[in-house]
Image (tube, rainbow, N blue to C red):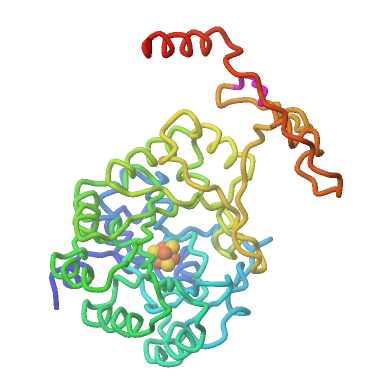
Amino acid sequence: MSDWQRRLKEESIATLEQLADRFGHDVIDVEALRPAFDNFQMRITPAALEQIHEVGDPMWNQYVPTVQELDIRDGIIDSLDEDADSPVPNITHRYPDRVLFLVSPVCASYCRFCTRRRKVGDPEKIPLNQYDSAFEYIRNHPEVRDVILSGGDPMMLSDRRIEYLLQKLREIPHVEIIRIGSRITSHLPERITPEFCEMVKKYHPVYMNTHFNHPRELTPAAVAALGRLADAGVPLGCQTVLLRGVNDDPKVMLELMQKLLKARVRPYYIYMADQVAGGEHFRTTVQKGLEIVKALRGWTSGLAVPHFVIDSPGGGGKVPLLPEYVEEITDDEVVFRNYEGKRFVYKQPRVAAAAGCGADDGRPTPDIVPIEIAKSPKRAKTVRRRKSANG
Ligand code: SF4
């Protein structure tokens, strides 16, 4: 057993009794929480435990079961309808050129908002002995150029098994990139061993989609693990879920995005929390998400501004959402407001204006009229100076 496996086994909290021993039996009502625990298993790694400072804080909310998980109103078991797009076990093929390949049933810590909580933690629902049909499916679909390994957390597998998966995928000529979706850098950073980093280099391009929801998760150990991956040539992105009681605050999100960039991770997505049964209490409004994006865009580097998306319930895929910056578009001009709310006008090109806003309406394209240059005093000055410099 490797060090990370031993630490996971011996130092994690995985029962309600252990949870009550740690935080107090007056705080943890073991019997009241039992149905939520039975519905979706719990484990909290030492790294995640250290991040919990008090009852009800953002880390607590992510990992400690609550009776609210049993209050299901609009919740859907398979909220993204992934099973409908699953041609063979362990594969979801929804988008034209990429597939999701579930390779691990388990996670280091279990997040209470998990979209895949119907399967995660259950080896019967994400079987480890059904890889062959998945490889065959990918082999027979030349349009698949991108394979996303997910689960559960693929980094819970041994290096040997991960290498087997990477090797098999690299034998398929049309697979161009492989992505590993993993929350391990936050949950169990010691899992990113030098041996893993050496191994993964052989199979590039291998990306990692990390998952951080709160700036507190970027501990020195997590940042060091991300550094090891970046040094091994693994491009790092982050998927963040917008969660009530965790990160539904522009200041928190801004700090998170900036810390991610410092740790060499490119923020990729902020997701609206899915409409998943058991996780409804984490949902906040779309307006809150737009408010957060507005608080990022322009106020910090564009690199720190991820796409804000809803993964459509029922399997429609990810749809990006943007705050409204444009006030008016005509054939002549676009009127918009910048990040500070100031109003600006952008003139449309003359050709487009004459033809009618880029529409192919059958009218002949008008002759291009030469534009008078150096109209502005600033530009005229520059031209004059150049002329005199040339004698
Ligand atoms: S790490 Fe990912 S798959 Fe595992 S419980 Fe958390 S959200 Fe779900």
Q: Nearer the viewer, residue 201 or 3?
A: 201
Per the rendered image, the range of residues in magenta is 341-346
User: Which residue: 28% across, 54% down?
Assistant: 49
In the image, residue 97 lies at what x, y percent?
A: 53, 72
Residue 30 seen in render: no
Residue 182 sits above or below residue 169 on the image: above
The secondary structure that most of the magenta stretch takes on is strand
User: Which residue: 66% across, 24% down?
Assistant: 371
Q: Is residue 111 left or right of residue 200?
A: right
Q: Quadrant of residue 165?
A: bottom left
User: Which residue: 54% across, 38% down?
Assistant: 293
In the image, residue 77 lies at what x, y percent?
A: 60, 71
Q: Nearer the viewer, residue 247 or 340?
A: 340
Q: Is residue 55 left or right of residue 157?
A: right
The quadrant of the rendered image in which ligand 1 is seen is bottom left
> Quadrant where the C terminus lies?
top left
In the image, residue 120 lies at what x, y percent?
A: 44, 74
Residue 199 seen in render: yes
User: Which residue: 60% across, 18% down?
Assistant: 373
In the image, residue 170 lies at what x, y percent?
A: 33, 80
Q: Nearer the viewer, residue 139 or 263?
A: 139
